[in-house]
Structure formats: structure tokens, C-alpha cells
Image (tube, grey):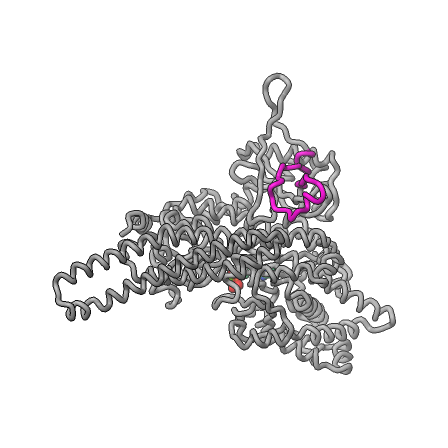
Amino acid sequence: MSDLRFKVVEEAFDRKAIPVEIPSERPERYYGKYVFNRQKMFEYLPKKTYDALVNAIDNKEPLSREIADSVAQGMKRWAIDNGARHYTHWFHPLTDGTAEKHDAFIDHDGKGGVVEEFTGKLLMQQEPDASSFPNGGIRNTFEARGYSAWDISSPAFILDKTLCIPTIFISYTGESLDYKTPLLKALNAVDKAATGVAQYFDPEVKHVHSYLGWEQEYFLVDEALYSARPDLVMTGRTLMGHESAKNQQLEDHYFGAIPSRVEAFMLDLEIECHRLGIPAKTRHNEVAPNQFELAPIFEETNLANDHNLLLMSLISEVARRHNFRVLLHEKPFAGINGSGKHNNWSLGTDTGVLLFSPGKTPKANLQFITFVVNAMAAVYHHNALLKASISSATNAHRLGANEAPPAIISIFAGAQLSDILEKIEKSTTTDILEFASKSGLSLGLSQIPEIMLDNTDRNRTSPFAFTGNRFEFRAVGSSANCASAMIALNAAVADQLNAFKKKIDERVEKGDDLTHALLDEIRALIIESKPIHFDGNGYSDEWKEEAARRGLDCETSVPKIFDAYLSNESVMMFDRTGVFSKVELEARNEVKWEMYTKKIQIEARVLGDLAINHIVPVATRYQSILVDNLVKIKTLFNDDKYSEIVKQDLNTIEKMARHMSIIKDEVETMVNARKDANRLTDEREKAIAYHDNVVPRMETIRYHIDKLELMVDNEMWPLPKYRELLFIR
Ligand code: ADP
Ligand code: MG
């Protein structure tokens, strides 16, 4: 066996679980230990400062400089008490992860020494020299500087002995250069819009929160095996590898017993999560071998998203302690399931009502149906945009493949909700009057059966499903920043609710009864957004045809899917809700196209290198062994006998030659396609060229390499095979 492969496989298979240090305190004692939460604020801040800060957080009001100084003092004291020596503004640039630039808590004391230093100014705003973050030209066009500013709604925390302060990241002229800024704007928009509508049902409502419960799927690979796969190291996925004879056919991994090495890792991770205030709750094996999931209890969307980003860096760190590498890529292995990050999303009032949860009275259920139908209408009107919000070079491998939601957005409502929608759609004025007068029976809104609250019969093939008290946006990719999907969704729903409220208010002003107006507008929305409602099998080919007939967006080329951000409807919607200006949208799309190109470019380079410098040489060596052998055999037999016994060998030699020749040709074509694409200056055109001309070459190259894997002597194959990578013991 290839020496390296032999060594790493043995190393991986010998590995034992690493014991985890379990804290002696109970979980509620160490939960949030490293978070500057209200409890710590109360402990470390003067009463006046504490009250002012809490008021600013709860009512979304600005903080005075004086209060900020006082907060900074308390926060610094807490951080130093907990071992921190540095602080950083922690922000979410338009790359995959988070960004930080650490500064020590020190300043000159004027006597040749230093003092601990941290002020309100440093807490509230900084100017990181972060000019190399992608910005789509915004900072060239406007002003070179980018600012980070404290997001007081998300608590500061300590990670690796550094105080991390969640911040937004914007240009000098105010354009957002990150994910958090537009997310906060979208959450604000949906708060205002939904509060306006919720007040029809309860005038006491002052705020509506958006909630997010993400489910993070990931793969684990042993560190030694990982390091022997340059494709995993450089691109996060295997660019080649023949399917293992056994993978997920037996469905023995899903919800199966968790291997002890993995269990130790998970426990360690959960303890770390809890110390950082991430409410990690559920863990289980996923469908594919080596695939797992972690889900926390849902939280307010901005915080939930910070927690997901934090988790994504934490998980890699903890995995390494256990000699694993975590793969957050959407499709690390061909032929088995990819990883997603279901975004469970809902809206809830500050009076404690979940707006997508049916109630016990007709009135509560009218509210429920109002919000559900508006959400459906928003998803319908902006289905192309929502798809763009979850699209990326990496998620493209997962969407539309067998086990994942198709590259078409539709909504699964389930039997009971569908039944109610139908009843309302077919309702008459008499039904509505009957509803207003008493029971709501005829519309199915009197009491919605409990079973709906526990909507277990879920359609896994739907990218956007109603699941009893929330919607589950399943098309989101495992490596994505959830903000992208949450910005588009919350903004679209805000815009829809505003339009709805406008219509209702106009009708009521003209003397129409409120209930009547609501039901009538709901009925109109149900009819209008019918094309988005699909409870059937989203994986079927018939659905693709049907979706096209219904006018849903069916584009499959990722660079073209991004166009949806710049459609008239999207630009106007984002403008009305104040989430993005057109300039910002244009700049961000430049970044998306550029990122797409770069990802494919890196993959293509790695694949070209592996194909020509790793695979072809090994295959050639094996082929030459076969040829040598034939020459020797020939000395032993007469011509007739010889041709008879070497038939298969000749065949193999010829087949290998053919595969290698195609690989070499295709690599050359791929390199030329890349060169041609690189000459294009327009980012969109370039991304399209990569999609159309480079990606197909990569697929062909892989196909032929995987064929060679089955022919070449197992002992000689240089890269760990799927069967070795995928079964942790
Ligand atoms: P499943 O895998 O069956 O979809 P999980 O239990 O793994 O479900 O995950 C469900 C996720 O949905 C959890 O993060 C949970 O906290 C979250 N969730 C539950 N109710 C809501 C809600 N009303 N709004 C947002 N998220 C929710
Ligand atoms: Mg799940």
C-alpha cells in the first residue's frame, strides 16, 4: 500500500476516545460562564449604568458616551477576572467565517509601565484596517475606511482568553460590509411590520421577535486521514473517490449509537457551548456515515446567528482536540447525503404568543392564519430571491441532488393547514359572518387539533416546510451564514405584512368590519400564492416540470441565481424595508460572483494537480507492471495460448490508457477554460464562464479518476479511499 496511506489508515483505526474533563459544577452553574449576560452586567456595573444599558437593549435605543465608558470599565473588569488579556471587535465580513483583530488591554502609564485600558470609545467603535475583506468595490467607490460598531443586542463573550464584542461592519459612508448590519435592519423591519398586524388582535403588543433554531449538520474525519487528502485540506470536500461498497444503504448510521470517540468530542463541544451561552440541546447521528448534527434551543434570530457562527469556529477547535477534522462543506463526499443547516424560523410577540402557532380560540386562529398566509405570500413573491439567499458554489452540490431539497423553492403546508387554507379559499360571505359572530367552525378555525402542534408527518423533500409552530427553511447550506437566508426571509415577510396592513387599514377606514377585511384579504392571498404551495414529492422530475408551469424560479446556474438580488422586485422590497440600497445589493453581488469564481478556481487547481501529479503517475506505474508481466508471460507460452490468457489484462491496459488519456485531455481543456474565464473582467460573466466551462470538466475528470481507482492495485493507490475515510470506529 502507498506508504502514507497505509500509515494514516493505521493511525486512524488505532485511535481511542479522548477522555473529557467534565466540570464538577452542575450545568446551570457554568452555563454562560464566559458571557457578559445580564447577571454579570448586574454584578459588574453600577446600578445606573445597568439600568441604562438594559433599557437601551430592550428598547433599541442609543447609549450615551458616559454610559458606554462605564460599561467598558465593568466589562473589562469582568473579562480580566476571567482570564482575558485581549479584546476584539468580532464581526461577520462577507467571507465564510468571522473576523477578529485582537488588542491587549494595556496603555502607557506615562511612567514607563502600562495600565489596563479599555474605554467606551474602544467598546463602541473601531476602525480595523480591514481593507482586504470583500466589499464589492464599495470602499473603492466611496471611502477606504471600514468601521466596526458595537451591537448591544448581542452579549460580549470570552473566547480563547479574548473578550469578543459583537459588532456590525460598515463603510465610512454607511454601506454595510457584513451580514450583521442588514440582518439587524431586516429584524427591525419585521418587528415593526408584524407588530402593526399583531395589534389587530392584541393592542398590547409592542414588539415582535424573529426566532431562529438552526440544526447544524457536519461530517467528522480522522485528522490523519484528512491530512493525507489534499482536496479535503484545500477545498473541504473530496474532489475524487469511488463510492464505498457500503455507505448509507442500510440506514444503520441515522440515529444509531454514537461511536465513543465521537461521543467524547460531542460532550466536550457541548460543555464549551454551554460555557459560551449557546443552548446546545440535541445531538445525533445523521443519515450518512460520519455525519452528525447539533441543534440548540431556538433563540432570537440575531443572537441565534451569532451563536451559530461561534459554534462553527468552536466545533473545528474542539474537533482537533479529539484528532478529528470537522467538515462543514455541504457535500464533502459524492454519493451520500450532504449537509444542510435547517433554519427553523418563527415570529413571536413580546406578550408571549408564537404567531405561527395555532391557538384555542377562533380569534387566536385568525391571527395564526393571518401570519401563516402572509409568510407564504412573501415566500411566493420572493421565491427566486430566497433561493439566491441560500445559493453558493458549495451548496450547489447539495441542492437538486437526490437527498436534498431541489433548487426550487416551494412550501409544504401539511394536510391540516392545507385543509384550512382550502376552506378559507372556498368560503362565502355567510361563512365569514358566521365566523365573526361566534365559532369559526365553518372555516376550520374554531379549534385546530393538537396533532398539528406536533406535526410529525413531515415532508423531508420540501425546502420550506410548515412544522406545527414554525417554518423550517431546509435549503440553507451547512457552511452558510444563516444571516443570508434570514435577511431575505424577514425582509420579504416584513414587506408583505406592510402591504397587507395597508390594505386592511384602508378597508377599515372605509367602514369595513375588521374581521371581514382580514378574512377577505387572507382569501385573496391564498389564491394569489397558490403556486408556492406544494405538498408532493419535491425530488421527483414531475415536480420540476410542474414548478416551471407554475412560474416558480427554476434556474440552476448559481451565478445566474444571484441575479434575483437585482431584480426589480428585490431592489424595491429591500428599499422599502430599508435593508439594502441598490448600491449595496450591486456590491454584494459582485462579492458573491467573485467568491463563486474563487471557490471553483481553487477546486479546479487542486483537482488538476491531483490528477496529473498523483493519480496519473500511480496509474502509469501500475499499468507498466501489467505490461512487464505480459512480456514475461509471453516467454512461457505459444502465441495462441498467450492471446487467450492475457485477454483481460490487455483489456485493462487499454482501458487504463483510455481513462488516463481522457484525464490528461480534460485537465488541459479545464486549464484553458480557466485561462479564458480569467480574462473576463465582468465578475458575473467570469462566474458564469467558470460554471459553464470549468465545472463540467471537473466532473468528467473525477469520473475517470474514480474508474481508475477500481483498476489500480489497492496497495498503490495514494489517497485514503471513501471506505477508509467514512467509518470511524
Ligand atoms: P428536527 O430534526 O426534527 O427537525 P430538531 O429537534 O433537530 O428537529 O430541531 C428543531 C429545531 O427547531 C431546534 O433548534 C428547536 O429549538 C427549533 N424550534 C422549535 N420551535 C421553534 C420555533 N417556534 N421557532 C424557531 N425554532 C424553533
Ligand atoms: Mg434535525
| Residue 55 place in picture, x, y as percent | 72, 45
The x and y percentages for residue 481 are: 58, 53
- Image spot of residue 516 (x, y percent): 79, 75
- Residue 456 in percent (x, y) is at 53, 70
Q: Is residue 617 toward the left or the right of residue 333 in the image?
A: left
Query: Which of the 4 image quadrants contains residue 383?
Result: bottom right
Count of labels shown?
0
The region drawn magenta spans 120-149
In percent of the image, x 73 and y 43: which residue is there? Answer: 173
Q: Is residue 678 shown to the viewer in this render?
A: yes
From the viewer's perspective, is residue 654 above or below residue 220? below
- Outermost residue, front side: 639
Residue farthest to the top, as pictured:
111
Q: Quadrant where the C terminus lies?
A: bottom left
Is 390 or 624 nearer to us in this picture?
624
- In the rendered view, does 682 fall on the left or right side of 338? right
Of 428 and 181, the residue lying toward us: 181
- Residue drawn where x is 52% and y is 64% of the image: 399
Quadrant position of ligand 1:
bottom right
